[in-house]
Image (tube, coloured by chain):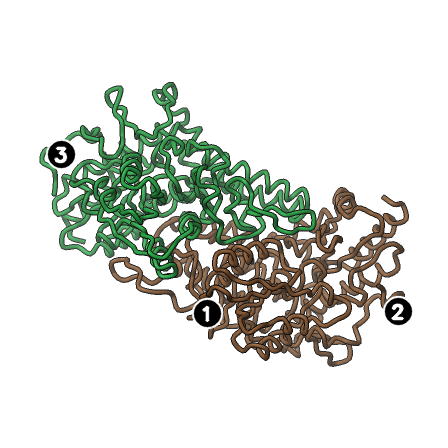
Chain colours: A green, B brown
Amino acid sequence: MRAPGDRGGDLVRWPRRIGRIGLIQYEGTQTRPSCFQLEPVMSDLAPPIALETYRQQFPALNNKLYFNYGGQGPLSKAALDAILESYTLMQQHGPFSKKALESVTAQIGLTHLAIAQELGVSANTITLTESVTAGCNIALWGLPWQKGDRLLITDCEHPGIVAAVRELSRRFGLEIDICPVQGTLNEGDAVGAIAERIQRDTRLVVLSHILWNTGQVLPLAEIIAACRRQNPDVLLLVDAAQSVGVLPLNLAELDADFYAFTGHKWLCGPDGVGGLYIRPALHDRLQPTFIGWRGICVDASGCPTGWKQDGTKFEMATSAFPLYRGLQVAIEAHRQWGSPAQRYQRIYSLSQRLWSHLQDIPSLRTLRTAPPEAGLVSFQVEGQSHKEWVQVLENWQIMMRLIADPNCIRVCLHYLTLEAEVDTLAEKLRQMVQSKV
Amino acid sequence: MRAPGDRGGDLVRWPRRIGRIGLIQYEGTQTRPSCFQLEPVMSDLAPPIALETYRQQFPALNNKLYFNYGGQGPLSKAALDAILESYTLMQQHGPFSKKALESVTAQIGLTHLAIAQELGVSANTITLTESVTAGCNIALWGLPWQKGDRLLITDCEHPGIVAAVRELSRRFGLEIDICPVQGTLNEGDAVGAIAERIQRDTRLVVLSHILWNTGQVLPLAEIIAACRRQNPDVLLLVDAAQSVGVLPLNLAELDADFYAFTGHKWLCGPDGVGGLYIRPALHDRLQPTFIGWRGICVDASGCPTGWKQDGTKFEMATSAFPLYRGLQVAIEAHRQWGSPAQRYQRIYSLSQRLWSHLQDIPSLRTLRTAPPEAGLVSFQVEGQSHKEWVQVLENWQIMMRLIADPNCIRVCLHYLTLEAEVDTLAEKLRQMVQSKV
């Protein structure tokens, strides 16, 4: 499965052929996705904060080699302090009072704004949710389904989303089509594989921007265009669990319909805060399903009169509001460290570094035969139990995760990752292969 | 509207006629709801912890007179410390690792258990949610609705729930019947008002155990029995936002179908954690709607194979897990302070104290003409803007809330409330009436 000539020496290499994932190449070694927000001055400067200093903010990174950012990102001391401060302030203001409510309302708005800046959209397109899953469910259950409608889902979606789609199908009599993209990791055409399965009755495509198992970056802009060529009415729901905080994004340009994400993975916010971007043209077509006070307007006697006119239409009720401050602080820190492009460049570079190392370890096979395009590197070890390997590594305080399908081990490289961590991991894996742990 | 002879002198009085709300009277002045869990030894002992000492744990109570427990309860220092400790531990363990996942799984189980103990049910009947609203939505959207089915809802439900019911009705072609219970606060028969509106096609009744606006305690056991006599197939969804943490409960005996609650009001847990009790016989009849990894079982290749067999079936995905510890600690503290019956007795006594005070203030009218049965006391002031009053009181650091329908001011009395706070509030209100603030 290894591409000839893709092994060996140079640790940081740039792919020669990158059109498939919608990346554009310019200035020699600069590589950016086509949905990238241009910040030409910033992107050529060194990040203003030294990584080693910056990393000390993250207690989770101080006692282990951490490669599970795609499961959950580490929480900085600053983010935790902000959460704590927010709890303290709420107790001072109320916790329930006019002043406290004004403070919560302001925090909701600021969180919309912080996320919107990261995604390249306006704040009123953002709905805050408890998780990426909640965001997907809002889109799935909010469409006016008719019996016989078709829904196309890739064969690499998260089990939770698969189960949601199945239940949706059972309730409304939908036909589910499965689109095999796992096989397009190294060869084949993901765009074609998806677009050719769009039928006249296909209402929704459910796919991930970055596949959580193999790490493949789907060329979303091309897929959206190809799907709409097949059927102008088809909508796309994107599970962005692995792309937000990794890819530089401009969703307004990308023109995605629904883009569901979480703050607690690559963005390093607290667990329990995520969101959903809804394309403005779809705001009125999507109906809220799980409904509470946050999404509605009421008259003077408290009687519901309609929906809010921005993304809060799909927000439900009381959430863990103090955590919103934590996510804001986490995002602000990323932005201070570097532009989305700079962060992505580093993730890209570190992933290539690890991938290159792994090419030299006998019996170990990266799922991708070409260097990775983002922060996930999945691999298999011949004749070994991946479950046992993950456990042994965790015992050594090296954290990565097992993936069930395809059976493999997944490593996540963040811009917070150090080159030395990558090298140590590779060395450790080499030793494990040699000693047949 | 005042009942003759109900005004005046004695501050703490017990009602003579309490059958309507399902309370039973015994041992002279002991008054308990019929759903009460018997703890005969404990209930006659003084609480082991002095209230003044105990209250110092709650920063929110130290800079104000707080009467908004029904909006949000104060968070104790111990609960916040537990949350902080949980965050720290998760960063130490992972935050994403086998060890971290084991810790989260344990915390989910312990939270089920802590809540179950409070409600008098087994832990496997409890689903953790983000809010009481989420719990109501799980029940509302999880039933197999057919066009033409009827849903009966009282005229005192929270606007968020009203909006959810309306959208449900629009989607599935349901008929909504409104049941006027607001008018039964002082006279009339809430049981009859509800039961007589149950029709052959009525599938669900949506009602609150304690009405959030008037504070009326609905006699739930009687209502359940009466509704089932009318139609053995009818189900009852109870909004328990104002009853959990107030009434001593034994849901297993009460035989409620769905009982949705939150931890952040009377239980004084963090906002963002609530739950839903589902009667075991209904576990298989209710389908999950918003679905994710927490509710499903998967096979060796990660493919969904079915639902979890306990309340986690209806849990979705990643939540703010460290907050679960906060709720556990909050509940544990209540249990240490006193039994559910002791806590209720104190709430009851304080509410009666306030109600009695208010009877003596000219131009001020409590909505209830008889003493209150639980912790909410709502009142109106003749010729005054309640909105302005609430604002003026908040400026003086006295927190209560405005209710839109019926237009009134709502005061919440917790067992944490001091007699002196009640007396000061009454005195302040008297001064306001006299000075026409």
Side of B57 where A349 appears, left or right: left
Rendering quarter of residue A40: top left
The disc numbered 3 marks a residue on which chain?
Answer: A
Q: Is residue B179 in sight in this rendering?
A: yes
Foreground of the two, B172 or B59: B172
Q: Residues within 10 Å of mark 1 (few under 14, many from 20)?
A: some
Q: Are marks 2 and 3 on the same chain?
A: no
Q: Mark 3 points at which residue?
A: A6
Residue under pointer 2? B4
Quadrant where the C terminus of chain B lies?
top right
Count neighbours of disc 3 (C-alpha within 10 A) and say few if under 14, some if 14 to 19, many if 20 or more: some
Alpha carbons under labels 1 and 3: distance apart? 53 Å
Q: In this view, does B11 lie to the left or right of A7?
A: right
For the residue labelled by badge 3, is the local secondary structure a helix, a strand or a loop?
Answer: loop
**Relative to residue B339, is residue B111 drawn left or right?**
left
Front position among marks 2 and 3: 2
Quadrant assignment for the N terminus of chain B = bottom right
Q: Residue A232 in the image: state x and y as whole percent.
A: 33, 39
Residue at the spot of label 1 = B124
Q: Could you tell me which residue is drawn at 59 percent across and 73 percent down?
A: B250
Q: What is the three-letter code of the residue carrying label 2?
A: Pro
